[in-house]
Image (cartoon, rainbow, N blue to C red):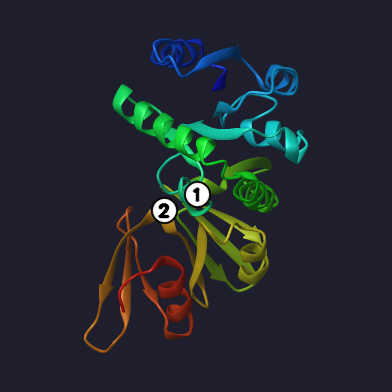
Amino acid sequence: MRVLIIDDEPRARNFMRKLLVDDLSVEIAGECADGYEAIQAIKAKTPDLIFLDVQMPEIDGFTVLERLRPDEIPAVIFVTAYDQYALRAFEQHALDYLLKPFDQERFSRTLEHAKLRIAERKSTQPAIAQLLASEQRRRAYLNRITVKRNGRILLVPTQDIEWIEAEDNYVLLHSGKEAYMLRQTLSNIQNRLDPDTFIRVHRSAIINIEALKELQPGFDGAYGLELKSGTKLRLSRGYRERFFEKFGYPR
């Protein structure tokens, strides 16, 4: 089995090479330090399997795959520093991944699984196509929001926003101890945010699901939400069904 290692971190490449070199069933076809090299190497060396770093400068792992023809894409093991929430995308599409930092045991299990899939000749193309489509949709959403304050223009990363509050024709973006006012309706800002991360919980509130600490059932069938910052909000009846369905909380 011909294997190509793709990672912009030399230490990561060295570690994976050391774990592969003693495996007699593996031939290391090469190493790539960036996405440009990776595209050329995959086309030229036609590996059976690639260990592909997701987060690389200029051309990331997803873009590498997007620039290949479907028949050029080998079996893929993603190597990523994404957190567990982001990894749901990989799990949903049945792709293998290694979460940095990983150890030899985890690496070996993942490699053996890949060998079985390749030996059984199960195509990974449908899963990869679904993952790329999901990633393209995600990229269409805002990852920063521009706000004006005291004559300055600030860029607020959406990942840092805990919740968004409606206030007449404005919204307040709550990020840590800061609250940024933006002339925008709550519905408009919701349409530009990733629905896998932000969910409406009230007609006047959207939360970042990563900021949620706990769901608190009430005696009257109502639910309270407590964020990691200590902020308490209410999950209204009109948004409860979608909340439960999307995130699988017990009713």
Circle 1 crowding by C-alpha within 10 Å: few under 14, some 14–19, many from 20: few
Instruction: Return the x and y of residue 182 as percentages of the image width and height.
Output: 63, 58
Label 1 amino acid?
Ala
The x and y percentages for residue 249 are: 34, 70
Position of 24 relative to 172 (above/below): above
Label 1 sits on residue: 94
- The numbered disc on residue 117 is none
Disc 2 crowd rating (10 Å Cα; few below 14, some 14-19, many 20+) is: some
Q: Is residue 45 left or right of residue 54?
A: right
Q: Nearer the viewer, residue 5 or 205?
A: 5
Q: Nearer the viewer, residue 5 or 60?
A: 5
Q: Residue furthest bottom?
A: 220
Q: Nearer the viewer, residue 133 or 209?
A: 133
Q: Which residue is mark 2?
A: 210
Give the residue displayed 42% in from the left and 79% down from the top.
Answer: 240
Q: Quadrant of the N terminus?
A: top right
**Cβ–Cβ under 8 Å for marks 2 and 1:** no
- Seen in the image, is 210 located left or right of residue 124? left
